Image: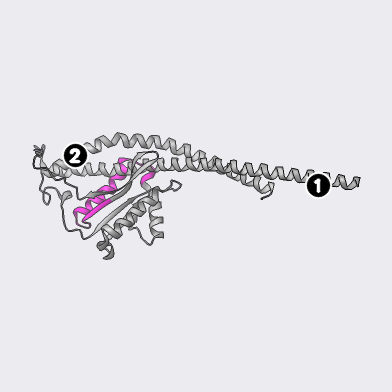
Amino acid sequence: MANLKEIRTRIASVKSTRQITSAMKMVAAAKLKKAQNAITQIRPYADKLYEILNNLSKSLDNSEDNPYAEQREVKKVLLVAITSNKGLCGAFNNNVVKKTIEAATTKYKSQYENGNLDIINIGKKAADLLKSRKFFSLKEYNDIYNNLSFESTSELSELLMKQFTVKKYDKIELIYNKFKNAASQTIMLEQFLPVLVEKTDEKTKSVDYIFEPSKFFIVNKLIPDSLKIQFFKAILDSNASEQGARMTAMHKATDNASDLISELQLNYNKARQAAITNEILEIVGGAEALNG
């Protein structure tokens, strides 16, 4: 059994760790509240705008009127892995990286083997984890979280749209954690471009739009704006998921530290009792020796 000094040192060390994890849990909880409000507020707007985008795309000619919905042979693919800049959030980042590698090696195996698959990442952790698995990012966008806003993400979403319309990529997919609650996130592999046009049931009437001011304005303004909103929503989902995952991870770490302290305290008491018993036995033994 370890001596008393070693156990006391371990108890002090674990208490210090518990204090840190508890503080990180509270910080993550405060950030989660703000991030959760942001994603819950934008979701109804983004979902309705996506519905309009989908209905609008059905009424346009995919190849000419709506270049963002052009379906073509998938020769080159871009995967956008959305993670965080910091760790200590459980399997949050690992799940995105695993999904990215899975998509590259299974869904887009031929493009990957032919060198026609690129990966860009948002968040430092994606690049580090991908590199450790021999997958390399084409580019990193880690500054978005410094000032997370619609304006800060619009530049990147515009770049992605441009790369699709000039046919640099035939398909662009987003990989991120969708926020459900503080303890649960869903890993998503979501097609960003081309715009997915849902098939209309024969019994369902398609929406007949009257374009005002013009079809040209709608295509060049409404559709890009709605795509920017979808991209921004994915970032907000990931940000809320990150804070929830970190809060949960730090809560578990704090509980584990408390359990370890209790165990160490029990071992300390046993060791102290054993030491006292030995001292008493030594005293009694010495006294008997003197009497003899």
Describe residue 159's horizontal placement relative to residue 121 as left or right.
left
Q: Which residue is mark 2?
A: 51
Q: Position of residue 184 (x, y in %)?
A: 37, 41
Q: Amino acid at mark 1?
A: Glu
Q: Which residue is mark 1?
A: 282
Describe residue 153's horizontal placement relative to residue 287 as left or right.
left
Element at badge 2?
Answer: helix
Describe residue 288's horizontal placement relative to residue 163 as left or right.
right
Task: Determine the residue located farthest toward the bottom in the rendered image.
Answer: 114
Element at badge 1?
Answer: helix
Give, as a single range, the part of the protein colored magenta.
144-173
- Which disc number belongs to residue 108? none
Residue toward you, 148 or 193:
193
Is 169 covered by the magenta stretch? yes
Mark 2, other Cα within 10 Å: few <14 / some 14–19 / many ≥20? some
At a point 14% along the width and 45% down the height, the residue shown is 199
